[in-house]
Amino acid sequence: MFLGMRAIAAGGSEIKAPGKNIPRAILISAVVLMVLYCSIAYVTVSVLSLDDITKSHIPLTLAAKQIFGETGAIILTIAAIIAALSSLSTAIMVQSSIIRALSRDGYLPKFFLSTHRRFKTPHITIIFGSIFYILFAATGVVEFIGYVAGFASILGFALVNLSLIRLRMKMPHLKRPFKIPLYPYVPVIGILVSILLLFFIEQSALSLGLAFILLGLVTYHLRMVGYNRIRIAFGGMSLGVGGFMALFVYLLRIGYPLPISVPSHQSTIIFYVLVFICAITILAGVLNITTKSKR
């Protein structure tokens, strides 16, 4: 239920008066959803045994059937389908906003920022995200994907609270239409609770999430280093590999005893192949270092 509130913040660029409406929507949603959630959970545990709840993937449908019979189960199933479709549309909106933000910051290609000429919708990001949804759904491991999504969401909540503290420290005079009450206790508690919830994530999903974090950190730092520095670094690496290859070719040519044996009938072919590779790597290194970038 908290994913919906995250969607409110993710779509901030498309919301009128976000400084006032986003906090208001999040607070109202939190209160309403917690009341509904706790009420439904109370009814469910009141009419079903713990064994039925833990073994069933549809405990709410069983509870509705227990109270209202088959009619109640059918109505709840229809409501669940409508809710799932609504959640899917919300998820598409969220991923579209996230992809466009990453594109604006330079982490993804700029064509993700384009919108449809007629409908003015981010159709490319919607199609791109939908392909991923289809692929994930086709795997059949819905529960595992749910754990991974839960890990990402919980981690996101922790980082949001941490960012709040960081912004208050670095920019104390920044205009804030909404100020969180009981600062800094609320964000600190939010961070601690989020970290605590991570221990309940499935181990494999946690490992995959940590791998994605590592990939994200590498991508972020490469971006911070800058294109020109990366290009020069790769140019230096190419020159180093080319120089080492040239030394190897020279030793092979003069017949120096090498730790690897080369058949005599293949030595000529290997020699010319290594000369070609050596020339390509050195040329690539020189071009990478000397070419002036237009970026």
Image (cartoon, rainbow, N blue to C red):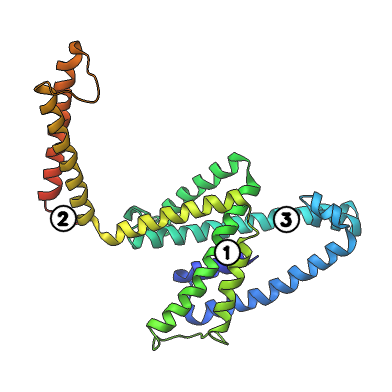
Which residue corresponds to the image point at 40% horizontal and 60% vertical from the top-left? 100
Q: Position of residue 12 (x, y in %)?
A: 47, 71
Of labels 3 and 2, the one closer to you: 2
Which residue corresponds to the image point at 17% horizontal and 30% vertical from the top-left? 277
Q: Is residue 99 left or right of residue 225?
A: right
Other residues around mark 1 within 10 Å, as few (<14) / some (14–19) / many (≥20): many
Q: Is residue 52 above or below residue 224?
A: above
Q: Nearer the viewer, residue 25 or 237?
A: 237
Asked if the residues shown at circle 1 and circle 2 are in contact, with their CB atoms under 8 angstroms apart, the answer is no
Q: Which residue is mark 2?
A: 294
Q: Is residue 264 left or right of residue 223?
A: left
Quadrant housing residue 153 = bottom right
Q: Is residue 193 left or right of residue 213?
A: right
Other residues around mark 3 within 10 Å, as few (<14) / some (14–19) / many (≥20): some
Asked if the residues shown at circle 3 and circle 1 are in contact, with their CB atoms under 8 angstroms apart, the answer is no
User: In terms of sequence position, does the residue under pointer 3 or pointer 1 come before the other?
Assistant: 3
State the CA–CA distance, disc 1 to disc 2. Answer: 40 Å
Q: Which mark is residue 154?
A: 1
Q: Position of residue 197 (x, y in %)?
A: 63, 64
Q: Helix or strand or loop: what does disc 3 sit on?
A: helix
Q: In the rendered view of the protein, which quadrant contains the C terminus?
A: bottom left
User: In terms of sequence position, does the residue under pointer 1 or pointer 2 come before the other?
Assistant: 1
Q: Nearer the viewer, residue 92 or 225?
A: 225
Identify the amino acid type marked 3: Ala
